[in-house]
Image: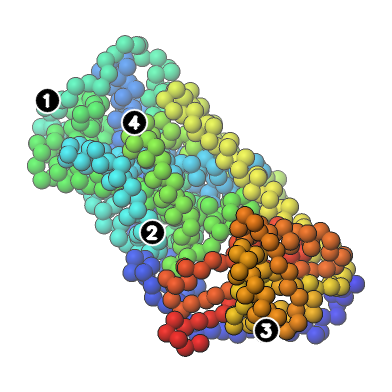
Amino acid sequence: MINHENNSQTSIIERTTDHTPQKNWQSWFIGRPLSTADASHQTIGKTVGLAVFASDALSSTAYATQEILVILAAAGTMAFGIVVPISIAIVILLAIVTISYEQTIHAYPDGGGAYIVARDNLGEFPALIAGASLLTDYILTVSVSIASGVAQITSAIPALHDYRVALSVGFIMFVMLMNLRGVKESGTAFAIPTYFFVVLMLIAVGTGLFRLFVAGSLGTVIDPPELLAHGVSAITPFLILHAFASGTTALTGVEAISNGITAFKEPRSKNAGITLVWMSLILGSLFLGISYLTKAIAAVPSESETVISQLGRTIFDGRGTLYLMLIGATTVILIMAANTAFADFPRLGALVAKDGFLPRQLTYRGSRLVYSRGIVALALIASLLLIIFNASVTRLIPLYAIGVFLSFTLSQGGMALRWYKIGKLKPGEEKVERGSTLRFVKDWPIKMLVNGFGSICTAVVMMVFAVTKFQDGAWVVLILIPVLVAGFWLIHRHYNNLAKKLSLDNFGIIPPHTMRHRVIMPVSGVHQGTLAALRYARMLSDDVTAVHVVIEPADAEKVRGKWETWGEGVRMVLLDSPYRLFIEPILGYISEIADKRQPGETITIVVPEFVSNNRLAGALHTNTANILREQLKNKHGIVITNVPYHVNEEGEE
């Protein structure tokens, strides 16, 4: 039996090393490797954090109002008058969701957002649904935003239309490369375009409101484009609800900060919460301003000209410098919206992987202290999606937003349940959960009602999306999320089964010692490398058998003669291979020996391996050890060992 108490003989030595990674081609692209101790210096403040995590949400102001008008167009231009009330309702929902996530940020300072909230309050299954929804949404965020930005470019330069897929993939690779350089560097690089967009939009909205209310000179759109659709139905509650749901695309990205709290400087919860409030205030103000001015100038939804473009040329009296700057900034922010997904997808993937529902490799940080595997995975999946859908925004947009509103619903529902659990605590009492600590607060009923109401609202929006966009492609997401959840469970089951089999919890008996060790050494020829491997084989066991596959009888006789001279008395088995096969006869012989081995017997295959200092020369030789290892790795009690024989091509051994 193993005596866990008597471990005084165990010696543990800690050493440090000064080894630093060598510069390679990656260093030129993503920068020098960073030490783990540099992690605290790679965090970001509120100003850069707004640029990193808000670009997705802020970019939605470029199309959210137009999405409302597209639906209302079914009832004619008279229905455009209700765009402002609908926008106000969306901003109220934005406020509710913001309050919910601001509470989530302080309750769960290690990040994770909807996934962690659902896991701790609703259970693993809802958490996996939230995780799958968000991961899907981040992939679609990259695809939709990049495709939308490229569409702006190809509209200005029609000659590039046939290259939109290549352009889209190129932009994704660029954003991926910037994020591989680290959160701090990518945030600093993308901060200028983000604030450039915000400033120009504020100037546009401010100028428009001034001209409308003070100067009285705003007027309406000159030469408006052709209306996207003509009225064929009445204004019904369902139409209003449909328009409301389409406009709530303005809320996509609000959850991003709650998932990326760990990227902020300390006090990170406070900094993340303030950044969230900033983002929501900017988003709500711009969205309301754009919607109000859209109604005032009688803008119409159209494929040929966006609402933002109509606003710009009306407010700035034509297509002058400010107009071009506004359109350029809008294009850049749409492409940059992908950066939010690149900031959050790897972090969320790492959290899910840490719980054992995704491959563990996603939890490893790369040389720049970012989850580089998650960043690369997101880029590849989003690129594949763009290739499949030919970078078409129209084909991608129906897949969008369902996942994020499902995560909103689960997050707010989880927070409501959390407040209910807090209400059962006594003042001063604490309850430690997996991801947070519950403490009694007096106003828990109000907070529970706010989160509960918000959960109901986002659930209604999600269901309207699912119904109205189902035939347009939303069915893909409704199928994809359950498939992802099933994949999570399969991965989790594998890790659990493996952990049980390798666990030391009930491991109390030392396995029996090997009673016998048999060595088999494949020999293609007799030379210095063969003899080096033979010496090693004889160190392992006295029971050594050399095996030579007879392809050409004349060559076999040479091997026999040399072995009798240099084989040190070790027996050799000659396997005749009339069909000139090499691996199959050896595998057959090894299997035959393995089937007849005694209990506790271990078989080691010792393979001489030629190693050259010239890589090109090394490619001219068959790597038998790797071939045998691949074929025999599933057989119990068989070990493959290669004994390298180094040769300097210049003649020096």
Is residue 585 shown above or below 485? below
Q: Mark 4 near mark 3, Cβ–Cβ under 8 Å?
A: no
Question: 103 or 227: nearer the eye?
Answer: 227
Kind of residue indicated by mark 1: Asp
Residue 77: image location, x then y, percent: 25, 18
Q: Secondary structure at mark 3?
A: helix
Check disc 1 and report its element: helix, strand or loop.
loop
What's the mark number on residue 566? 3
Bin the neighbour count of mark 3 within 10 Å (Cα to Cα): few under 14, some 14-19, many 20 and up.
some
Residue 313 is left or right of residue 71, and the answer is: left
The tag earlier along the polypeptide, 1 or 4, is: 1
Residue at mark 1 to residue at mark 3: CA–CA distance:
96 Å
Q: Residues within 10 Å of mark 2 (few under 14, many from 20)?
A: many
Q: Which residue is mark 1?
A: 223
Q: Dividing the picture into quarters, in which one does residue 354 lie?
A: bottom right
Q: Earlier in the sequence, mark 1 or mark 2?
A: 2
Residue type, mark 3 in image: Trp
**Dot placed on the residue nearer the N-terminal end, 1 or 3:** 1
Residue 56 shown left or right of residue 589 in the figure: left
To which residue does mark 2 refer?
A: 179
The mark lying in front, picked from 4 and 3, is 3
Instruction: Provide the residue designation for mark 4.
Output: 394
Type of amino acid under label 2: Asn
- The answer to which of 349 and 603 lies nearer the viewer is 603
Q: Which residue is pictured at 74% across the width and 65% down the height?
A: 638
Q: Secondary structure at mark 4?
A: helix
* Residue 540 coordinates in the image, percent (x, y): 75, 79
